[in-house]
Image (tube, grey):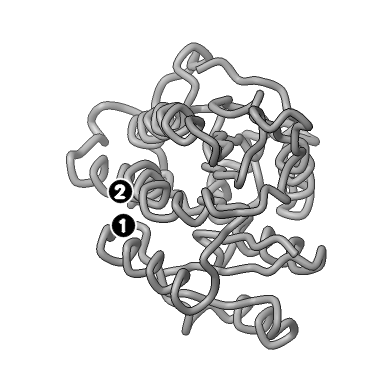
């Protein structure tokens, strides 16, 4: 039975990942900043007590991330097959900047902490557990030189593409996601060495009906706004079919490559 850890599991697509993976029989370790207020997550744990555990983890705190990794290893499992970093913010104001006049050091710093620094440090502290995984998530290559032990997914966004940026704006969000893509590429190189290889990818979930995107729904073309259920279904289809040939890639929900 594979084991997955979801960071940012209390709502949005993080919560949806937990629900779908549990229904597939996957053991899920759900991480969020305030488990006591994560009512839907608590209900999921009550419904599936043998499959769901909840671990407090503030992705903006290195101390909390390190403690979370130690707790997972000691109290739950010494190996993980899948880690998905889902937490993300447009900016602390809840809206992307439309001009330079709205850019501030404080907002940039907070956005990068959630969208970039946290996921990278998740890679640092949880990669040893992924390197001890079974490789049961994703396709295993018959040639052991191309085998993998786990999968690390960073939830990115198409607006993090530098070459695809034709509109500008959203400085902190675009920059933090572009930096996350670079971090993912770096992780894929380091964790792709040796016998215990980990697939590392950045995924774009599409425009999803969540709190993050809600202020901009009126600008989304008809048929392009996904429910959480649709997005996670597409993303899991991509994740299920990953191989070491895909590590380091920046992929959309339909599996197509996005230019960095």
How far apart marks 1 and 2 lie (CA) works out to 5 Å
Measuring from the top left, give residue 89's x and y in whole percent: 43, 49
Q: Is residue 130 visible?
A: yes
Q: Is residue 249 left or right of residue 92?
A: right
Disc tally is 2
Determine crowd level at label 1: few under 14, some 14-19, many 20+ residues with C-alpha closer than 10 A. many
Q: Which quadrant holds residue 80? A: bottom right
* Left or right side of 215 for 143: right
Check residue 60 in the rendering and tell me which mark sits there, or answer none.
Answer: 1
Point out the residue furthest to the left here.
105
**Relative depth, front residue between 175 and 138:** 138
In which quarter of the view is residue 189 placed? top left
Residue 174 seen in the figure: no
Q: Earlier in the sequence, mark 1 or mark 2?
A: 1
- The residue to which callout 2 is attached is 113
Q: Residue sitting at 19 percent across and 46 percent down?
A: 106
C-beta proximity under 8 Å, tags 1 and 2: yes
Give the percent coordinates (x, y) of residue 186.
40, 28
**Residue pictured at 61% horizontal, 52% vertical:** 82
Secondary structure found at label 2: helix
Residue at position x 35%, y 62% from top?
65
Locate the N terminus by quadrant: bottom right
In the image, residue 75 lies at what x, y percent?
A: 48, 79
Q: Nearer the viewer, residue 166 or 228?
A: 228
- Is residue 153 found left or right of 24 in the rendered image? left
Binning the other alpha carbons within 10 Å of mark 2 as few (below 14), some (14 to 19) or many (20 upward) gives some
Of the pair 82 and 146, the residue shown nearer to us: 146
Residue appearing at x 58%, y 81% in the figure: 39
Residue 128 x/y as whole percent: 44, 52
At mark 1, the secondary structure is: loop
């Amino acid at each position: 039975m594979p084991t997955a850890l979801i960071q940012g599991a209390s709502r949005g697509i993080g919560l949806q990942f937990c629900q779908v993976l549990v229904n597939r029989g996957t053991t899920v370790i759900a991480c969020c900043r305030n488990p006591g207020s994560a009512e839907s997550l608590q209900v999921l744990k009550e419904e599936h007590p043998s499959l769901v555990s909840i671990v407090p983890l503030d992705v903006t705190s290195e101390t909390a991330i390190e403690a979370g990794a130690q707790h997972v290893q000691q109290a739950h499992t010494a190996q993980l097959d899948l880690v998905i970093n889902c937490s993300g913010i447009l900016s602390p104001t809840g809206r992307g900047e439309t001009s330079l006049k709205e850019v501030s050091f404080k907002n940039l710093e907070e956005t990068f902490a959630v969208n970039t620094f946290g996921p990278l440090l998740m890679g640092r502290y949880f990669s040893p557990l992924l390197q001890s995984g079974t490789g049961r998530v994703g396709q295993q290559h018959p040639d052991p030189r191309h085998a993998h032990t786990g999968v690390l997914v960073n939830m990115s966004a198409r607006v993090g593409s530098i070459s695809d940026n034709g509109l500008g704006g959203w400085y902190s969000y675009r920059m933090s996601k572009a930096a996350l893509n670079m971090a993912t590429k770096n992780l894929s190189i380091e964790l792709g060495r040796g016998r215990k290889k980990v697939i590392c990818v950045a995924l774009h979930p599409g425009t999803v009906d969540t709190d993050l995107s809600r202020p901009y729904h009126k600008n989304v073309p008809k048929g392009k706004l996904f429910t959480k259920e649709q997005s996670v279904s597409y993303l899991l289809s991509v994740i299920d079919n990953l191989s070491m040939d895909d590590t380091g890639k920046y992929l959309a929900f339909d599996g197509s490559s996005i230019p960095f």
